[in-house]
Image (spheres, rainbow, N blue to C red):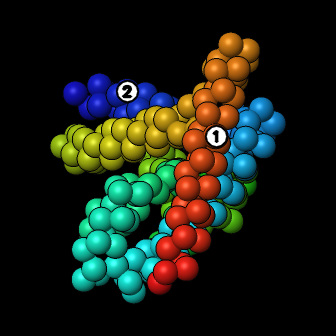
Amino acid sequence: MVQLLRAKALRMQALLLDLIEYWHYANSILLPKTEEKYRRLFGKFEAELDAMIKASSRIEQKLNSLYDRAVKGNPATTEAFRFVFHFNENKPLSHCCCSRNNAISGCGSLAKQDVADIKRKYYSIVKCLHPDASNNATMFSRFWNILVLAYKNSDYFLISQLYNAICFDICRFYSSVSSEEKLLTERLMVLESSVTEMKQKIKELFENKPLLYIRKLDDPIWIKKKRKELINKILHQRSRLKLQQRAYAAFKVHF
């Protein structure tokens, strides 16, 4: 039983280390290259669309302010606003807002105990990873740069994953079979949980653009279709912005 647990733990450890290495490659090398390619193909269209969305948002705020000052309690004017914008009475223009969700991954602000935990785990990994301590130059060369970058960026998640993968000697022998079996079972649960988390992180990374489109960025038909889609959005947003500007100018005269 102990031998089976140890073999399974070693397989899970190897899988976790491979996933960590792939996550680092995808996040620090593949993602910037894909972003650059995506920006080169569609950057000017998205920049124009973003500028129009921001301008539309500014006009919307002015219209909402105008609505709050002049429209409440005046049924005729309320109907005029509704006719032009199909307002919801409590939240005018809410349906007109174009929202774009950008998935941004980050650690956010860290509590003091998290910072202390990062340092503790970092030095534990260094001790296990560094060839001067572990005599394992291969492991050191694979993961040293990943560890340094994670520590520099205060990447609590990645440091914890490295800690789970590296800071435990699965092949260590214990005085009793029962204690070894218990520790290996606990270790296996930690590794399985870490593997699941890393797979989810990688999945989330590839579910967001531009990596979502990584296989399509070499397809000229898809590129043409995507550009047409962005141009149509720009035209739609431009007409909406003109409508908002005309409406604001007209209503401002009266209120």
Of circles 2 and 1, the one toward us is: 1
Q: Nearer the viewer, residue 235 or 227?
A: 235
Crowd band around label 1 with a 10 angstrom C-alpha radius: few (<14), some (14–19), many (20+)? few
Q: Position of residue 68 (x, y in %)?
A: 37, 82
Q: Earlier in the sequence, mark 2 or mark 1?
A: 2
Q: Measured along the vertical axis of the image, is residue 136 above or below residue 94? A: above
Q: Amino acid at mark 2?
A: Ala
Q: Quarter-wise, where is residue 76 in the image?
A: bottom left
| Residue carrying label 1 | 235
Q: Is residue 114 left or right of residue 227?
A: left
Identify the residue at horizontal 70%, vertical 20% (top origin).
224
Residue 141's image quarter? top right
Residue 20 vertical position relative to residue 113 in the rendered view, above or below: above
**Hey, what amino acid is under mark 1?**
Leu
For mark 2, give the secondary structure: helix
Q: CA distance from mark 2 to mark 1?
A: 60 Å
Residue 198 relative to residue 226: left or right:
left
Q: Which residue is mark 2?
A: 7
From the viewer's perspective, is 225 left or right of 190?
Answer: right
